Amino acid sequence: MKAHDFVKTETGQYIEAEVLKIFRKLDLNQDGEVTLEEFLHGFPNKTDEDFKRMDTNSDGKHTLSEQTAHQSKGLEELIVQIEKNAANIVDKSDTDGDGHVSMKEYDRIVFHEGL
């Protein structure tokens, strides 16, 4: 699985660091919004229609929260992997089969089996 770097935004949302880096690079005047002009300057091969398609609330600008409202493919894959790992840990730890990890089960798996 590919390693990802994530950062926490001012709103508390975790996003891929590269997304934030690109957004900040596009936002030439650093006002927290990417206009059509800034978008086309940063992506000369894109069109007005590309911008409009990504402008989910049709206000003529992109904000970071608007652009990250839909999770990237990399983040989706990472979440799926984390959920699988968590389920695997619970399965290994839950020796009495009740669907929960008690402190006793937790201590055994962490301190004695080196999870």
Image (cartoon, rainbow, N blue to C red):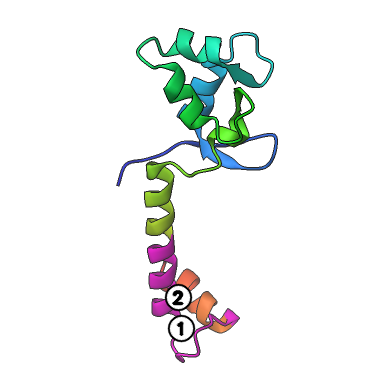
Residue 22 on image: x %, y %: 48, 21
In the rendered view, would you say 72 is above or below 33?
Answer: below
| 11 sits to left or right of 69 | right
User: Depth check: 38 or 80 in front?
Assistant: 38
State the SS at label 1: loop
Residue 104 on image: x %, y %: 56, 83
Residue 64 on image: x %, y %: 60, 30
In the rendered view, would you say 115 is above or below 38?
Answer: below
Residue 5 on image: x %, y %: 46, 36
Q: Residue at x 42, y 24 (%)?
A: 50
**Which amino acid type corresponds to the residue marked 2 in the rendered image?**
Val
Find residue 103 and report its image quarter: bottom right
Quadrant placement of the C terminus: bottom left
User: Depth check: 34 or 19 in front?
Assistant: 34
Q: Which mark is residue 82?
A: none
To which residue does mark 1 refer? 94
**Which amino acid type corresponds to the residue marked 1 in the rendered image?**
Asp
Q: Residue at x 69, y 16 (%)?
A: 31
User: Depth check: 50 or 84 in front?
Assistant: 50
| Labels in figure, total | 2
| 26 sits to left or right of 78 | right
Marks 2 and 1 close (CB-CB < 8 Å): yes
Q: Which mark is residue 90?
A: 2
Does residue 49 belong to the magenta stretch?
no
Separation (CA) of disc 2 from disc 1 = 6 Å
State the SS at label 2: helix
Magenta segment? 83-103
